[in-house]
Image (tube, rainbow, N blue to C red):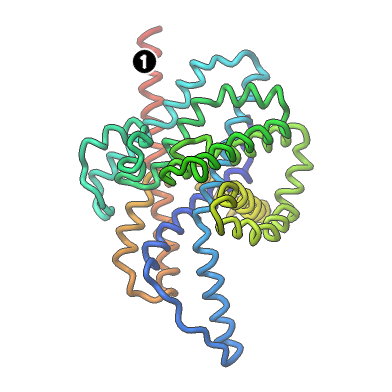
Amino acid sequence: MKRLLWVDISKGLAILFVAYFHFFTTYFQHGVLPPPDWSNFAASTLTILRLVWLKISGLGFHAVGVFIILSGWTLMQSTARRAETGTIHWGAWYWARLVRLYPMYWVAHLVYLVSPFVARLEPVDDRIILSLLGLRFIDIQMNFMYLNAAWWYFSMLIQFYLIFPLLFWTARRAGPWLFLLIGCAAGFFARYVLLVLWPQNGLWVLGGFAICRLPEFALGISLAMWYTQSPARLESFLLRGAGFTVGLILYPTALQLYHGLFPYVFVDFATGACCMLEIVGIAGFMSLFNGPASLFGLVGLYSYGLYLIHQPYVIWLGLRIREIPIWAFLLICIPVLVFLAAWGMLLEKGTNALVNKLLSTRKSAHA
């Protein structure tokens, strides 16, 4: 299956936004902007830029929703393509996903344990067993954010993979619109129960119970189906400015859903969809330029490695540079993110190569 460069660029932008967000929140956790200065044009411009920077930086966690949407898209697209060539053997499908996910996840644990310059905020104890298994939703308050808080996403992802055959079957029979409606209804109902009817730890809604994030995942699956039906039409909307404009207009309304318990039922889907439209719109513009497109596409291709390793590094550094001015922080961000992207890419490529070699050796031995 031919990879869509703009999807990889979108993944690259999203994971860099997430990594930047974790770096920013650590550095600026107790920070305060200088008092607004409207005395002249230059001072007013600087004041506006600071406010815009602070607002946009604080939205970085919305890019997680973008990843959920794009994960649904790519998983549906690859599985549908396989279905077109013959019967899907779900046992082999599960095995391929486990081999893709777990080895690099385990390598990330090893890197965390042995690397210098990482923030170790919790002791290594018997909770690491559940972490290695990906079952971080067991005793969720103690385990979900253990060692590396970003790894909560992994435990949600394996739940989606577990139920994906059912989602795939439903989507193929219901069609994209009805499937999206079903996915949103199930997800919003689960969130309503856990937030309003039977209030539970918020980590369940964050992703500990994957159905709570099903609306975003279902949107990605439906988008993949719409793309198959009319690729030119969907690309025109997403990549040529219309989708970006729609997302920009709707974003303020989506942010209002944070105000109130009932509106919060819908906020992750709304903000994730708006953020996706912005990021994909930027990716569409970036795809017009070969150099940046190739660079960010490469980051997106290996975004999994960067996601798994980045947070302990940026927390460690962020805690040590809190006293520097904002302009210095922004200058430091660029080489830090470049280094982490390269380090994550090196680890992921090396891990995948080793796993493929071991599997090839095993097949040869059984032949």
What x and y, as percent, mark residue 54?
Answer: 50, 69
Callout 1 amino acid: Arg
Residue 304 is drawn in which quadrant? top left
For mark 1, does the 10 Å Cα neighbourhood hold few (<14), some (14 to 19), or many (20 or more) residues?
few
What x and y, as percent, mark residue 325?
Answer: 39, 76
At x 37%, y 33%, the residue is 134
Q: Nearer the viewer, residue 260 or 315?
A: 260
Residue found farthest to the bottom: 39
What x and y, as percent, mark residue 122?
Answer: 24, 49
Q: Quadrant of the N terminus?
A: top right
Residue found farthest to the front: 197
Query: Does residue 219 sit above or below 172 in this rendering?
Result: below
At x 45%, y 77%, the residue is 33
Q: Nearer the viewer, residue 355 or 220?
A: 220
Q: Nearer the viewer, residue 105 or 353?
A: 105
Q: Is residue 64 left or right of residue 287?
A: left
Q: Which residue is mark 1?
A: 362
At x 68%, y 55%, the residue is 247
Q: Is residue 322 visible?
A: yes
At x 68%, y 60%, the residue is 248
Q: Is residue 286 left or right of residue 232?
A: left
Q: Is residue 311 left or right of residue 70?
A: left
What is the count of numbered marks?
A: 1
Q: Is residue 303 visible?
A: no
Q: Quadrant of the C terminus?
A: top left
Q: Secondary structure at mark 1?
A: helix
